[in-house]
């Protein structure tokens, strides 16, 4: 079974990589663009094919109501950049140098790396058991969302299978639409495809990009390909648990790499592409770089505040240095800002909590203190996470060049503050950390890899050069060892197998007619407040392969809220946007005293066939009358009840 799991997902990955390469190369040949015969050229061809395929699929399935429509604008920008500069990101517009045979060899390498990634992910998993992943619940959520996108075409993460809310909600959809495409083609389980196929495509794309980076400094050897594999685990060194400083222990949030935080793979791709473009001797490279940076808010809307702030600072710098700003660069930024604003403003539902701006609260002493703590604490955390690289910069400053060191620190500093300030401003929202982490984790990782390569190439002293190489490899080696240790610990803590929940799986896979159900929960942890992230069906999604399998919380008003918490407004807003709360607001008889009656009415109105509860939930007498126990699944903390229609 395990071998079959590995081989079928490897086949899906190879087929998609092959089609992406073919589409990208075919389009460029049709346009008569010259593509360099290099790993950089292969990387760009792959990206073009990937985004063309995924964007077209999203446009068709959403009937045009997708934020990926913005990639059409990015394509126009790149066409305009090429037309104005009479150059292309790839080279002169003539017959190409890239050959099919060269791409086939790269495809073979990508297939081998894909196999390694899939085997690594499954190595810690017992046959028939759960996938062992650090953010497993996140992957289930993304898998469910990819099914929802495919079934409804609506970019909305609320899983509204009742009212089918057509409003679009900001989120990261590129990495989810690729999974929707794979589900559409293969009809396999969404969670399995997300972890073993979609994210494998993303990771091997990063590997190809890292090879392209190393190629620009050292060429390509077997050693560089192996080093690039290790660099997939490159991240900061998490010191907090060692030195036991309380505020440093939260730095683990930023000690992520591409393998255990795979949803960020499109951002890694764009950061690598920007570095590659910067390395090319193209006098018009700033235009191309701006166009690529403007793709980031479309890929992941959380990057929008930081990207726009970076570009604003770039525009200010251009005005001070040159006294003028090229109008087309500013116009591109304005167009993307307007596109995102109009797209999400037109019929938008809530964006996931409290993102409002309150002048009086933002000028209060408590707010300012928290803002300073967020910014200052993050500076210290990131510095310690990447301490080996900063020490290398310090000890090689004379040989590398003080001006280069200054430029490196200035680039890091400006980018860092451009992304940490939005987080600090919106710290009341529990998701606001992603305004910083989603872009800065890939940026710092790829940027410091590039700087390390540049230092190694620039320094003549052999001892210094070897020390730099050791420091560069220290981060990914520690990242890999930490990842293996954590996966082993997770594997030892998981005792759930498909056989232990077999009866439940059979019920939801075939016996129940309507897969949308409801749940009652007595849990009051953070997950129950992050609806629908806390839906009880999440524990069965890996084993049940069925459309519209989802449960709706009818216990949202039982969740205790702390009015003194900085997340109070955010949590209150999420409850108000919950599906059952919206149902209650439409009921003339709604009052806090008759919630139980309206819960029963909801079940009757929408022909609900089953109810889930957590295992320790004590079923009230009024619900015992119309619910019949079916299955107990203590291994996953669940009980399943069927609804007795005649007693509703």
Image: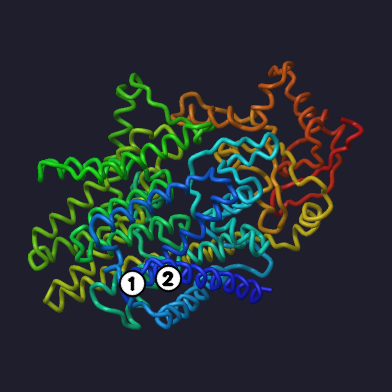
**Is residue 37 rendered to the left or right of residue 339?**
left
The image quarter in which residue 368 lies: top left
Q: Position of residue 78 (x, y in %)?
A: 33, 55
Quadrant housing the C terminus: top right
Q: Which residue occupies the foreground of this view, 7 or 75? A: 75
Find residue 441 and report its horizontal and vertical position in percent.
36, 54
Crowding near the residue tagged with mark 2, few <14, some 14–19, many ≥20 C-alpha atoms within 10 Å? many
Q: Is residue 98 left or right of residue 195?
A: left
Disc 1 element: loop
Q: Secondary structure at mark 2?
A: helix
Tell me which residue sits at (54%, 53%) in the image: 176
Residue of label 2: 25
Residue drawn where x is 46% and y is 64% of the image: 49
Question: Which numbered marker is on residue 35?
Answer: 1
Badge 1 local density, few (<14 within 10 Å), some, or many (20+)? many
Say which residue appears at 33% left-offset and 37% top-offset: 422
In this picture, is 375 found above or below 17? Answer: above
Q: Is residue 595 above or below residue 29?
A: above
Q: Position of residue 614 (x, y in %)?
A: 71, 43
Looking at the image, residue 398 sits to the left or right of residue 94; the answer is left
Residues tagged 1 and 2 counted as in contact (Cβ below 8 A): yes
Q: Quick one: quadrant of the N terminus?
A: bottom right
Residue 458 in picture, x, y percent from top left: 14, 71
Figure colour scheme: rainbow
Q: Is residue 112 above or below residue 83?
A: below
């Amino acid at each position: 079974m395990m071998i079959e799991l590995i081989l079928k997902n490897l086949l899906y990955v190879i087929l998609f990589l092959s089609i992406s390469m073919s589409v990208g190369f075919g389009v460029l040949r049709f346009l008569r663009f010259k593509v360099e015969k290099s790993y950089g050229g292969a990387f760009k061809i792959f990206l073009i094919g990937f985004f063309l395929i995924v964007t077209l699929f999203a446009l068709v399935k959403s009937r045009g109501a997708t934020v990926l429509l913005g990639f059409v604008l990015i394509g126009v920008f790149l066409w305009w950049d090429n037309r104005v500069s009479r150059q292309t990101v790839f080279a002169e517009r003539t017959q190409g140098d890239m050959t099919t045979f060269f791409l086939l060899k790269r495809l073979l390498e990508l297939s081998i790396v894909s196999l390694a990634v899939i085997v690594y992910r499954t190595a810690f998993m017992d046959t028939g058991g759960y996938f062992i992943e650090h953010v497993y619940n996140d992957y289930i959520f993304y898998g469910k969302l990819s099914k929802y996108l495919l079934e409804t075409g609506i970019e909305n993460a609320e899983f509204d299978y009742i009212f089918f809310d057509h409003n679009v909600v900001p989120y990261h959809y590129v990495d989810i639409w690729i999974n929707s495409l794979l589900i559409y083609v293969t009809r396999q389980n969404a969670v399995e495809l997300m972890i073993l196929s979609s994210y494998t495509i993303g990771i091997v794309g990063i590997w190809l990009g890292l090879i392209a980076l190393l190629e620009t400094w050292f060429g390509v050897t077997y050693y560089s390909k192996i080093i690039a594999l290790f660099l997939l685990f490159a991240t900061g060194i998490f010191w907090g648990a060692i030195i036991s400083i309380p505020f440093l222990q939260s730095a683990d949030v930023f000690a992520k790499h591409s393998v255990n935080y795979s949803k960020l793979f499109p951002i890694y791709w764009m950061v690598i592409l920007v570095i590659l473009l910067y390395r090319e001797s193209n006098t018009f490279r700033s235009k191309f770089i701006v166009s690529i940076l403007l793709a980031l808010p479309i890929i992941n809307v959380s990057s929008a505040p930081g990207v726009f702030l970076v570009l604003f600072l770039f525009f200010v710098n251009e005005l001070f240095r040159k006294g003028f700003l090229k109008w087309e660069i500013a116009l591109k930024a304005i167009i993307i800002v307007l596109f995102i604003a109009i797209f999400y403003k037109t019929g938008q539902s809530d964006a996931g909590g409290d993102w409002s701006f309150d002048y009086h609260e933002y000028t209060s002493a408590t707010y300012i203190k928290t803002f300073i703590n967020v910014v200052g604490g993050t500076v210290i955390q990131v510095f310690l996470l990447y301490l080996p690289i900063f020490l290398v910069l310090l000890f090689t400053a004379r040989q590398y060049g003080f001006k280069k060191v200054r430029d490196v620190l200035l680039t890091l500093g400006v980018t860092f503050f451009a992304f940490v300030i939005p987080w600090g401003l919106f710290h009341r929202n529990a998701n606001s950390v992603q305004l910083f982490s989603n872009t800065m984790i890939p940026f710092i990782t790829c940027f410091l890899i590039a700087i390390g390569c540049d230092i190694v190439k620039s320094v003549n002293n052999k001892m210094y050069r070897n020390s730099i190489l050791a420091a560069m490899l220290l981060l990914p080696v520690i990242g890999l060892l930490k990842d293996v240790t954590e996966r082993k610990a997770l594997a030892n803590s998981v005792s759930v197998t498909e056989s232990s929940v077999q009866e439940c799986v059979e019920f939801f896979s075939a016996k129940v007619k309507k897969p949308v159900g409801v749940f009652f929960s007595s849990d009051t942890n953070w997950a129950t407040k992050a609806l629908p992230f806390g839906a009880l069906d999440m524990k069965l999604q890996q084993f049940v392969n069925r459309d519209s399998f989802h449960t709706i919380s009818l216990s949202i008003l039982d969740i205790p809220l702390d009015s003194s918490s900085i997340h109070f407004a955010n949590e209150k807003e999420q409850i108000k946007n919950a599906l059952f709360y919206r149902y209650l607001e439409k009921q003339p008889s709604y009052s806090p005293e008759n919630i139980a009656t309206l819960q029963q009415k909801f079940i009757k109105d929408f022909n609900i066939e089953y109810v889930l509860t957590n295992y320790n939930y004590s079923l009230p007498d009024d619900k015992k009358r119309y619910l019949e126990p079916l299955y107990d699944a203590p291994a996953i903390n669940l009980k399943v009840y069927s609804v007795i229609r005649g007693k509703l």
